[in-house]
């Protein structure tokens, strides 16, 4: 039976409460060596036990059993240390663990790819299974975990019901033709004729269509889970598997929808800043200086709102003034490219920007048509550095208008149930989808979605 290990996070907590660490007596800590330096008579190990971002400094001297072995321990080795805690108020670290005994629990071969030095994101991307042991990724994945809980706390705190929408569907919610088809294979490896469901099945691109009926029963609901898109866009913001937070609210229009979006984003920022101070300090110092000031500013002001039509005018003006876009032809009706979105949020709004009322022809079939007959009550939230992180809309609640659109798109057949909602107690309702991975990029300043996902899936990349 192993002795019960003390967690480093508990030691830091006791210390910050002003408790006398000596009172803890002899403690036993298990973890992984981050660095080890030995000067003959005395040696220092920076040990990380995984319970918090901070390491604990282990001090050992040459009297220790097995000194030769310990002094040559390499980065990555798993060890157990018995010792006593000593406050070191005059040092960088507030306390040290003076080792009485160190046991090697899992040695590390010399070919271990993570070394003491800083590795590039690209190098580590190729080692998805080891990178959680680095500072950057330990920080990222902990923030990811905390943020996920924050999302649930926010919505549940407001009385929203969490709905598990299916991953396997028979429809393409966004109608963009980017679904992954699911199929069983026969003995020869060909899709079987009847296949499992007797119809085309695919992985969901959005939980929205399945969550809407729940909003029309519970009023305020959300779904939060993985979504899949066979999108070949090779960008820093697109993954083929990503998580989406999709709230849906009944008796609510686009205005209410935007208010909820803003409240959600602000809650998430405060939540992470409060609960992950060490991680956020690390991003600020090492990854994206200025992130904390940026987030503080976002919290301090209402988000700007702008009509799509005004956005187009501003982009035209920018071109006239010599701004170089790769896609120069700006005209009403076009879908905005990321460079256009970024111009509006970075140069014009200088912060988060709601762009609203898009041309109906470039948006999904379920969005509420505006009285002008040309636009829909849709809204994207654009942020500096990334462009779109939320897409949302008021939903078309008029049976005839929606039906005509679905007939035009050819998706009425499998979605009759969705259409029925418009004649059986349908009401004004709205919702949106936050790209969880993009939100994490925004909060941490990490620039590539391949780094915010533990095992990123992008076109041509399925190593792990
Ligand atoms: O704008 P989208 O396509 O909206 C929907 O799917 C709606 N059904 C949401 C709703 O109203 N319930 O996607 C929503 C968000 C985007 O703003 C973006 O942040 C993220 O999902 N997203 C992606 N994130 C990573 N990789 C991709 N390939 C993404 N595609 C969309
Ligand atoms: Mg969108």
Image (cartoon, helix red, strand yellow):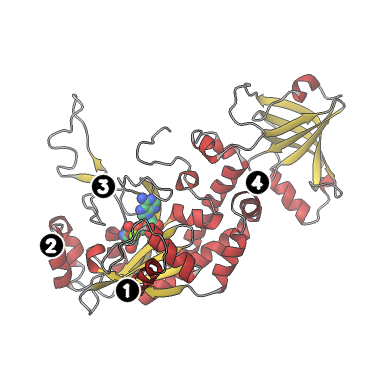
- Distance of mark 2 from mark 1, alpha carbons? 25 Å
Of residue 371 and residue 212, the one placed in the foreground of this image is 371
- The mark closer to the camera, 2 or 1, is 1
Q: Does the residue tagged 2 have its C-beta within 8 Å of any atom of ligand 1?
A: no
Could you tell me which residue is drawn at 25 percent across and 76 percent down? Answer: 370
- Please report whichever mark, 1 or 3, sits nearer to the chain's N-terminal start: 3
- The mark closer to the camera, 2 or 4, is 2
- Please report whichever mark, 3 or 4, sits nearer to the chain's N-terminal start: 4
- Please report whichever mark, 2 or 3, sits nearer to the chain's N-terminal start: 3
Q: Secondary structure at mark 2?
A: helix
Could you tell me which residue is drawn at 66 percent across and 39 percent down? Answer: 49
- The mark closer to the camera, 3 or 4, is 3
Q: Secondary structure at mark 4?
A: loop
Q: Does the residue tagged 1 have its C-beta within 8 Å of any atom of ligand 2?
A: no
**Image quadrant, ligand 1:** bottom left
| Residue underneath mark 4 | 53
342 to 74, vertically: above or below: below
Classify residue 271 by image quadrant: bottom right
Label 2 with label 3: CB-CB less than 8 Å: no
- Distance of mark 1 from mark 3, alpha carbons? 31 Å
Q: Is residue 181 in sight in this rendering?
A: yes
In the displayed structure, does residue 313 sit left or right of residue 289?
Answer: left
Q: Residues within 10 Å of mark 2 (few under 14, many from 20)?
A: few
| Rendered location of residue 238, percent (x, y) | 39, 49
Label 4 with label 1: CB-CB less than 8 Å: no
- Distance of mark 2 from mark 3, alpha carbons? 20 Å
- The mark closer to the camera, 1 or 3, is 1
């Amino acid at each position: 039976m192993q002795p019960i290990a003390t967690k480093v996070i508990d030691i830091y907590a006791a210390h910050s409460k002003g408790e006398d660490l000596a009172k803890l007596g002899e403690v036993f800590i298990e973890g992984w060596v981050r660095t080890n330096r030995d000067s003959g008579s005395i040696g220092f190990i920076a040990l990380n036990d995984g319970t918090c971002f901070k390491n604990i400094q282990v001090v050992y001297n040459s009297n220790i059993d097995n000194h030769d072995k310990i002094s040559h321990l390499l980065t990555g080795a798993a060890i157990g240390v018995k010792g006593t805690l000593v406050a070191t108020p005059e040092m960088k670290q507030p306390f040290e663990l003076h080792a009485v005994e160190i046991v090697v629990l899992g040695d590390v071969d010399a070919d271990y790819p993570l070394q003491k030095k800083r590795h590039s994101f690209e190098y580590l991307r190729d080692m998805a299974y080891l990178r959680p042991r680095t500072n950057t990724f330990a920080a990222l994945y902990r923030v990811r975990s905390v943020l996920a809980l924050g999302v649930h706390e926010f919505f549940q705190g407001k009385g929203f019901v969490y709905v598990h929408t299916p991953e396997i569907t028979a429809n393409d919610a966004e109608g963009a033709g980017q679904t992954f088809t699911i199929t069983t294979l026969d003995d020869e490896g060909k899709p079987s004729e009847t296949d499992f469901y007797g119809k085309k099945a695919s992985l969901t691109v959005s939980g929205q269509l399945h969550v809407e009926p729940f909003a029309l029963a519970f009023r305020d609901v959300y779904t939060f889970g993985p979504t899949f898109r066979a999108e070949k866009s090779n960008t820093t913001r697109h993954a083929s598997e990503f998580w989406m937070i999709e709230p849906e609210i009944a008796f609510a229009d686009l205005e209410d929808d935007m208010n909820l979006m803003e409240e959600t984003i602000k809650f998430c920022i405060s939540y992470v800043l409060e609960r992950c101070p060490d991680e956020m300090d690390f991003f600020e110092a090492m990854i994206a200086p200025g992130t904390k000031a940026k987030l503080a500013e976002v919290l301090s002001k209402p988000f700007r709102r702008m009509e799509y039509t005004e956005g187009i005018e501003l982009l035209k003006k920018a071109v006239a003034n010599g701004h170089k876009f790769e896609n120069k032809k700006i005209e009403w009706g076009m879908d905005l490219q990321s460079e256009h979105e970024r111009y509006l949020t970075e140069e014009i709004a200088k912060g988060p920007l709601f762009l609203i009322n898009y041309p109906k022809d470039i948006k999904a079939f379920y969005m509420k048509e505006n009285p002008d007959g040309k636009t829909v009550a849709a809204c994207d939230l654009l942020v500096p550095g990334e462009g779109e992180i939320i897409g949302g809309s008021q939903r078309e609640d008029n049976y005839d208008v929606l039906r005509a659109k679905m007939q035009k798109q050819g998706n009425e057949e499998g979605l009759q149930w969705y259409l029925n909602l418009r004649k059986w107690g349908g009401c004004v309702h709205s919702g949106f989808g936050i790209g969880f991975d993009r939100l994490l990029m925004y909060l941490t300043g990490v620039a590539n979605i391949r780094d915010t996902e533990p095992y990123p899936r992008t076109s041509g990349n399925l190593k792990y």
